[in-house]
Amino acid sequence: MAHWYDHAIIYQIYPKSFQDTNNDGIGDLNGIRQRIPYLQKLGINAIWLNPVFVSPQVDNGYDVSNYFAIDPAMGTMEDMNSLIEDCHKAGIHVIMDFVLNHTSNQHPWFQDAISDPNSIYRDYYIFAGKDGKRPNNWGSFFGGSVWEEDPAGTGEFYFHLFDKKMPDLNWKNPEVRHSMLEIAEYWLEKGIDGLRLDAFIHIAKADLRQNFPTEDGNGDPVVAEPFFANLPQVQTWLRPFCEQIKQDYPETLLLGEAASANVNLAVDYTERRNHLMDSVVTFRYFTEDNSQVDKHYSDVYQPKTLDMTAFKQNQTVWQQTLAGISYPTLYWSNHDMARLRTRVAKNDIQARSLAMLMYLQRGIPIIYYGEELGMQNLQFDNESQFSDQTVEAFIASAKKAGLSKEEAIKMASLVHKMPARGPMPWNHDKNYGFSEADSWIKGQKVDNCVVDDQIDDERSSFNFYKRMLELKQEDLFQDGDYYLLSTDKNSYVYQRDLGEKSAIVASSLSDKETAVVIPKGYEVEKLSAGDYQLNDGKLTLMPYSGVVLMKK
């Protein structure tokens, strides 16, 4: 049975950075409504909104203090209802980010849990340890230990995989599972079309007594990911949640964030008989080349190139393994990584060629706002702008190796996720039309991408994306088989087949002229980025260029 999301083309909107209508420097729901015609013109059919719930904004909305209300900075519930209605009128589905691994420490459940050790909400969270001694040596993704002292002074600790102000929920507790289902169905009743299940792979934890073995055994915090990622109970606990949603709202897209999941886990999570997700987002696509890393200081924010051979291997394995199981997600950027044009693409031609390469494969495209313009990361000038203690540690390491603070900040700006969340540039007015007020995020714009300059220019990146997405909607690129041709590291060439229809998608990965041999008969150009030559089955691609050729 076909579902709308099998042919989804998703546009990820970071609401704080898209469009501000009340001039407080923070994007809002009415700003998204205002830009629906732009979304229609681009050719997407779904939007994914990063969290818009009430939040203290410790982690930009991923710390939720009230799941049943809209954060006032984003608007009102009436605004949300209107956005859903207007999007549906425009043929656009709405996917909400649903944070189910943790809450804010300001959430009433947690506040009750720490105000009364006998509270029923105490078991909504994970408390362990005693007499001021932490249960284990597990480390947080945000640095330090996963354990923070109970503010009530009980001598226990609460578990937080992310920031200490974001305590993890205890999914062992059936009441937690029931409560999260109630929240999800509340929003589905309002008419949203999908849920992105944030960090769902972390809801189960191993035995809390178990330290992660280290060489020196000194107990310093270590990110013990095998003990809190992709454990079997994740599937056990989520299956009733997903089954109930599908029973009550059969057309709901369940898109799981499975950052560290390998392809076999992706099969488990999306195989229909398992009654879990429809698709998952993995971070396993992108293997970096560490050969040029300077070992005299931390490599965490040193810019690295993409290992293109490993990338080809990763893509092909995911494409072939999920064939007949589910649609993989296809993306180059999101709010948790640097932008495509900053991180990978050397110039605008390559950015287009890589987009074509990625999104015309079998799967569901997810395009990060502004990517269609060729937007790059902002350039920060102060470590505080990153709001990340790991950046401060990187700067200290780089300075110790002889680099200047400015050099280290520039590096981090090219790699870190925060500079990828800059305001959408609509026009040449004040603050590029995003807001009359200064933006919530400070940083220097380093590109010249502006919507008004591109929307009517047929040669622009925007119109390239528009043509590409029109092509993506054809049956061949939605439902056709995928087969990667064997080429060297300088190119990425694959074939899509559906009945009598067939296409070759070829992209150069090199800064030099690249020649590949393709099957004969592919002569009709459907889309191109940069220049190429075709002569009797020999395709010559100019540096970083790409082309889609149809069989005659």
Image: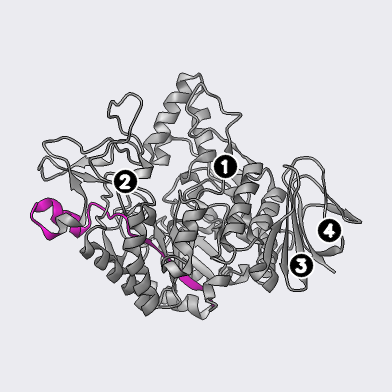
* Residue 422 visible in the current orientation: no
Badge 4: how crowded within 10 Å, few (<14), some, or many (20+)?
A: few
- The amino acid marked with disc number 2 is Leu
The residue closer to the viewer here, 480 or 132, is 480
**SS for callout 4:** loop
Image quarter of the C terminus: bottom right
Q: Is residue 109 magenta?
A: yes
Q: Does the residue at mark 2 contact the one at mark 1 (Cβ under 8 Å)? A: no
**SS for callout 2:** loop
Q: Position of residue 117 (x, y in %)?
A: 9, 51
Work out whether 516 lies above or below 289.
below
Query: What residue is pinned by disc 2?
Result: 161
Q: Is residue 67 magenta?
A: no
Which residue is depicted at the point 60% across and 53% down?
317
Q: Position of residue 88 (x, y in %)?
A: 49, 78
Badge 2: how crowded within 10 Å, few (<14), some, or many (20+)?
A: many
